[in-house]
Structure formats: structure tokens, C-alpha cells
Amino acid sequence: MKFRPLLFLLIVLSFKVVHAQETTSTDELFKQARTAAFDQKDYLKAIALSKQALHQSPDYADIRIFLGRLYTWSKQPDSARAEFNRVLQKKPDNEDATLAAASLAYWNDNPANALDLLQHGLHYHPASKDLLLLKAKVLAGMKRYNEAETALDSLRATDKGNTEARALASRIRDYTSKNKIGISYDYIYFDKQFDAAWHLASVDYTRQTGIGPVTARLNYANRFSTNGTQAELEAYPHISQTFYAYVSGGYSGNVGVFPKYRAGFSLYANLPAAFEAEAGFRYLTFGDPTWIYTASIGKYYKRYWFNFRTFLTPSNSAISQSFGLNMRYYYGGADDYLSLGLGTGISPDDPRNNVLLNNGNPYKLRSDNVSAGYRHAFKTFNLIFINLSLVNQEYRQHTRGNQFDAGIGYIRRF
């Protein structure tokens, strides 16, 4: 008999706990679920709280969509799909549910289903920025580049500063034409370092292939009062929706005017929020080989693009470093921009200056540079560009000179 008061107390406490749980508002449970997911990264707890909230309010669409996203992040696509479909069955015009369901199909390599969902959603919301952007991504992944550009044009009509749209347009622009030819010329003047100016010219042809664009290029230079030519081949193979690569190689029989061999490789990753990351290497040889490692991070922000890059050159005693910051302001489409660059050291990717790496330890001498450029597309398939740069080079210890460069080029797509 002595246990009856204790049993009664336990029953009362249990009733109070259950009552407290039942009286917790749906919105409060939703808030707790979001905190568990975003702050604590505890998806299981967030799922349990979302289910509890839906038990109280089964038709609360925002919570059901959130639960579907939790299942998506927990790699439970069937459960996620069921939640999104339940919302769309009751509210076919729900934009958020459409976007979530189409994103799930896109991420699970079902672009046809994703496109069907997006077309359905755009019927109700034809100007939706999120739906148009995802539609462009899906179409680009299906290699339907012209349709992807049409979707991006619709998006940019109402949101010209959309960073992800601009990043995607830059990546797919070269895919809209099978062929591209280009020609360029640079005049380089030195006030102290060399008596004669340098002249550089190049002509290239790019073909769009099943793996990505491939370019063949022939370079000519007159440096140190000597003529030389260099042949190059480069490609940007597509690996996945996230990754692509840069592969290049070149040869010249005129060592000194050009490096005898040059090669390069980089792996690029298209990241969320219009970021792009890169890591790779460059190889040059004028007799003794030089290995240079590079990494960069890029970001689109409204009408701007920023890229920070470093080159690292190991030696027996230290690792030499150079840095570059490049910025673009887009005043029109993906090929219409003004650029500005600031940097230190010599870039192995710069054909105007990489020959100066042929002096043992180039990064022991300081080099600072600033550049500006103008790029403009006209009549759809034509593009011109102009580049100007100033380099202040320490070509001997405690002795500096200036290098001025003016370049012009033309590209034709067909």
C-alpha cells in the first residue's frame, strides 16, 4: 500500500509532461527543428520534431517541405520525394515544394523528371528566379545549351545582378558554338631591362567536343631580337556537374624565346553560392625543369567576379610565392566586362612574361604588376578584347625597370 502515493505521483507527472508536449505550439516545434538542423547539425532530432509538429498540423506545408529537405540531406530520397509530392498534390502551385522536388531529382541524376517538375512550376510562376536558374542548370547538364541560355536570358531580364546566373552563363557560353577562332597581338616595351621591344602574336582554333572544348594554338614571338614559334594544345574536359579540368601542353624549338616544354593541369570545382575553387600544377623547362603549384578561389557577386590565385615554386632552400587578384565588372552579358588585376611575381600562365622564369630563382627578385582590360561581344558571335599592363620588375638586385604591354585580340564563334 505504501507504493500507491508514489505511483499516483508518477502518473500525475507523466500527465503533465504529455500535456506540456501537446501544448507546445506547432511554430515553436518548427523553430526547434530548424535549430536542431542548422545549429546542431542533428538531422534525426530535427526529423522527430518536424514529425511531431505535423502530427499537430498535418497541412502545414512549410514544415512538410522542410521535413522533405531533412530527408534529402539524410540521403533518404524516397522519403523526401513522398513529402514533396504530398504537398504538391494538395497545392500544385507551391513554388518551394516544386523547387525542392526538382532539386532532389537533379541531384539524383534524374534530369528529365527535374525538368518536368520545373516546367510545371514555371506554369504557375513564370518569372521565378529560383526555378529559372535550376532549369538552366538542368538543361546545361543535359547539354541543351541553347535552351539553358534562353532560361538564363529570362532570369536576367528581371535580375541582371544574379551571381549564379552569371557564373553559369560564363561556363556554358563556349558550348553554344561548335567552333571558335581567335587571334591576338601584344607589344611590350621596356624602359631599362631590354633595348628592343618584344612582339607576340597567336592564332588559335577551338572545337567543342563530347568531353569539352579543345584548343590548338600557334604562338609567335620576337624577343631578344630573335624570332621563335611555339605550338600548344589545351582542353577543358568535363568530369561531372561539379568538376571539370584544365589540361595543356606546349613545345618550342626556339628555347629562350619560349620554354622548350610547358605543361599544366588543374582541377576545378563549381561550389555553392557561385564560388569556384582550383588546384593544379604548371611545368616549364628551358633545360632544367621548373615545377610550379597553383591554387585559386573565385567568387561571383552581383555584377562582379573576384579571383585570388597563388603560385608556389619549391626550391632546395625555400618555397617562392607569387600572388594575383583579378576583378571583373560585367556591364552586359557573360562576355561584356571590364577587368582589373593586381599581382606580384611572374605567372607561368602569362605568355608575355613566363620566359623570364628562365633565370634560376626568379622569385628572389621582386616584381609588381597592375593590368586593366576591356572585353565586348557584338553581333552574337564576335568578341574583341584590349589589355593594358604595367610591370615594375627588379631584374637585378636593387635595380628596377618598367615593362609596358598593350594587347588586342578578336574571337569569332561559328
Image: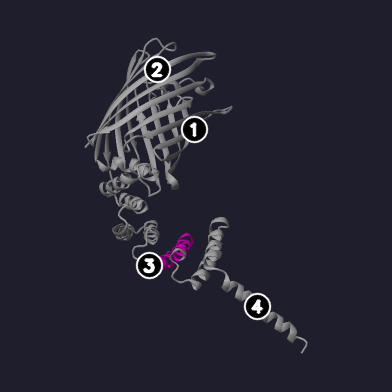
The span from disc 1 to disc 3 (Cα, nearest Å) is: 47 Å
Q: Can residue 44 be seen by looking at this rendering?
A: no
Q: CA distance from mark 1 to mark 2?
A: 23 Å
Label 2: how many Cα within 10 Å (few below 14, some 14–19, many 20+): some
Mark 4 and mark 3 residues within 8 Å of each other at the beta carbon: no
Q: Is residue 174 visible to us here?
A: yes
What percent of the width, then of the height, locates residue 244? 38, 44
Q: Position of residue 105 (x, y in %)?
A: 37, 60
- In this picture, which residue range is highlighted in magenta? 64-89
Look at mark 1 in the image and give the residue it sits on.
310
Q: Quadrant of residue 357?
A: top left
Residue drawn where x is 60% and y is 75% of the image:
19
Q: Which residue is mark 4?
A: 14
Q: Residue furthest right?
A: 2
Task: Please tell me whether residue 88 belongs to the stretch shown in magenta.
Answer: yes
Q: Secondary structure at mark 1?
A: strand
Q: Nearer the viewer, mark 1 or mark 2?
A: 2
In the picture shown, does residue 382 fall above or below 190? below
Q: What secondary structure is the stretch in magenta mostly built from?
A: helix
Residue 86: within the magenta?
yes
Question: Mark 3 is on which residue type?
Answer: Asn
Residue with the mark numbered 3: 85
